[in-house]
Amino acid sequence: MKQTYTITESDGVVRVDKFLAAKYPEYSRAAIAKLFTLNLIKLGGVPLLPGHKLRPGTTFEYDLGPLSEKPEVIELPVLYEDDDVIVVNKPAGIISHARGRFWQEASVASFIRDRISGMDGERGGIVHRLDRATSGVMICAKNEASLSFLQKQFSERSVEKTYIAVVSGSPEHDEAIIDAPIGRDLKAPKMFRVDPDGKSAQTTYKVLEKSAKHSLLELKPKTGRTHQLRVHLAYIKTPIVGDELYKGEVFERLLLHAKSLKIKLSDGKVRTFTSEVPTQFREMLK
């Protein structure tokens, strides 16, 4: 809720961050600092820096709304659960974890929060992530030992991930490996691009089905770069349908789905978890 306050003579000249910390002792310094990061402390509509000094008679505005530590909770389809892991079928439009400690939007992390033991609630239990627009299989850890065990497999690239995508047009080859390094696009910070100086990235693809305008692809990333599949498919001139960020065809959602995940569990058994591909995908091929 937005509020205003006018510095009084008794307040004297104060640093805005220290003033708010003293006024609201129930919130930590990190919480107050987050308000500045979110540009929620303003003077005349202009965001203030933490060290800005306010004099008596100055009126500034602030919003404490994001300081709730209880993000919205949603129900997600559970594909598998035991004492160490929970595997969910993430819908498109849901984020993997909160963007900050005080972010209230529902996420996979907020769904599993009450199921995990002794881990931070913001990203606690999140082993890997899927983009907001991507649907499909996500495995989460329920304790620290499981988290370390699973993350080690991702870092060693021993996890087998399979995605399904609908793209515009058709690749030159029905089956191939895209080996193209990826780096952040300096002209558009939210985007990534193929960059000779970027991090190595490899994606194997196979055409499963074609129509006059679209192709259904099976994708197996060998690396796990941010936006890797989206960048690689745009690079070979077959952007994913619905991927407007990378100049894909406009659609109601991104047609990228994490179909399966093959990974070893802490009991030593290798399991493959699968999620049914949404009907929209094949309907695009008709």
Image (cartoon, helix red, strand yellow):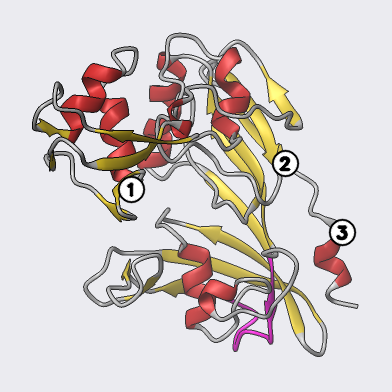
Mark 2 Cα-neighbour bin, 10 Å: few <14, some 14–19, many ≥20: many
Q: Quadrant of the C terminus?
A: bottom right
SS of the residue at dot 3?
helix
Which mark sits nearer the N-terminus, 3 or 1? 1
Which mark sits nearer the N-terminus, 2 or 3? 2
Which mark sits nearer the N-terminus, 2 or 1? 1
Q: For the point 19% across and 34% down, which residue is it? A: 16
Q: What are the residue bounds of the magenta stretch?
A: 165-175
Is residue 10 shown above or below 286? above
Residue of label 3: 279
Residue of label 2: 274
Q: Amino acid at mark 3?
A: Thr
Mark 3 Cα-neighbour bin, 10 Å: few <14, some 14–19, many ≥20: few
**Foreground residue, 119 or 231?**
119
Q: Which mark is residue 39?
A: 1
Q: Amino acid at mark 2?
A: Thr
Alpha carbons under labels 2 and 1: distance apart: 42 Å
Residue 29 in sight here: no
Alpha carbons under labels 3 and 1: distance apart: 41 Å
As drawn, is 40 to the left or to the right of 137? Answer: left
Q: Given contact means CB atoms under 8 Å apart, are the residues at marks 3 and 1 in contact? A: no
Q: For the point 43% across and 27% down, which residue is it? A: 67
**Foreground residue, 60 or 142?**
60
Q: Position of residue 174 (x, y in %)?
A: 65, 80
Q: For the point 22% across and 32% down, which residue is it? A: 7
